[in-house]
Image (spheres, grey):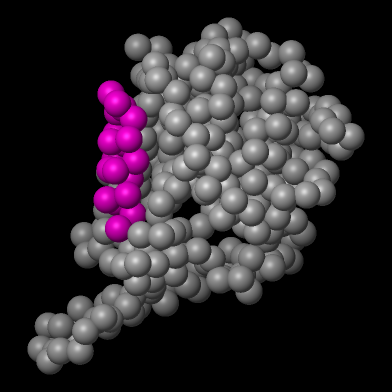
Amino acid sequence: MSYVLSAETTGHERDFSSHDVARAIRAAQRSAHRILLSLAVIAVIALNAGSCTTTPGDSASVIVDGRSVAYRVLGSGEPVVVMLSGLGDGMDSFEDVAPDIAKVATVIIYDRAGYGGSAAAAGPRDAEAIDGELSGLLAQIGVRGPYVLLGHSVGGLYAEYIAAKHGDQVTGLILEESRPADFSRRCEAAQAGWCTPPTLLTWLMPRGAQDEFGALAATIAQVESVRSASGQRVMILSRSVPDEPTAIDALWAQAQTDLAARYDGSQHLIAAHAGHYVHHDERAWFVASITKFLTR
């Protein structure tokens, strides 16, 4: 479960017509539905002791820095696609799409520390730590690059950092609904809504997600401190924009456009009918877009 939370906000007092009242009621209903849906999903996670981080039955594990890291390798040949899930999600988030992508590439999915079959780790869980963990995993399993990194939501921040630090090994970058490094600042400045999950809700996340959320500020600073590697092919996949976007919807859409602009020659595709989980909501489109990116 990665998070982009929305909340309707009013910044100015004004007279309301009947149309305005009706629109406000519809907006409030949408907001209530979103909040209740988020709370319901989080409750399921808490009651099922990590139902979103179940380790696939055919996964394997290796020891990295003295602890177990669970992973799965699908397909064969080049390129090698490494998929990084969002906050709160284990490798099973990609279970429905990884086999199809593996028809044209080797695909690696894994549980970061504190998710699914991977033991929790001591110390900050920032982008630097994620980089070290993934480097250790790849060295252990012996799957050589070149690599294409696919990051969803917060996983996109990690992918950006790793791609910048290992430009000689990473030839491609796919950012699915990736959280731009400057999004929190822009959201807070615009007073657009809930810019990060409330602390209370993070208590119900898996241990790994709590640790990563606690290090989010450090991760953002690390991503902003590195210079993007040149020569990498980049694709941005973004969710649909609602017919009546909230302030945070509009800000997120603009941030996605700005993220694409930071990478020269990047391709920016917007799903027609998808939310934050494009790979779930528009699975066929997601797979087709990535397949084309990998094979063209």
Up the image or down, 30 lies above or below 243; here it is below
Up the image or down, 232 lies above or below 64; here it is above
> Which of the pair 140/126 is nearer the observer?
126
281 on left or right of 212: left
Occupied quadrant, residue 146:
top right
Q: State the quadrant of the N terminus.
A: bottom right
**In the rendered image, is residue 84 in sight?**
yes
Report x, y in % for residue 264.
Answer: 29, 26
Which residue is drawn at the image coordinates 50% and 64% (left, top)?
A: 196
> Which of the pair 147/189 is nearer the observer?
189
* Range of magenta residues: 251-270
Report x, y in % for residue 286.
Answer: 40, 33
290 on left or right of 84: left
169 on left or right of 235: right
Q: Is residue 34 magenta?
A: no
Up the image or down, 127 lies above or below 210; here it is above
Which residue is drawn at the image coordinates 57% and 30% (left, top)?
A: 162
> Which of the pair 104/151 is nearer the observer?
151
Q: State the quadrant of the C terminus.
A: top left
Which residue is drawn at the image coordinates 84% and 33% (left, top)?
A: 65
Which residue is drawn at the image coordinates 64% and 65% (left, top)?
A: 202
128 on left or right of 163: right
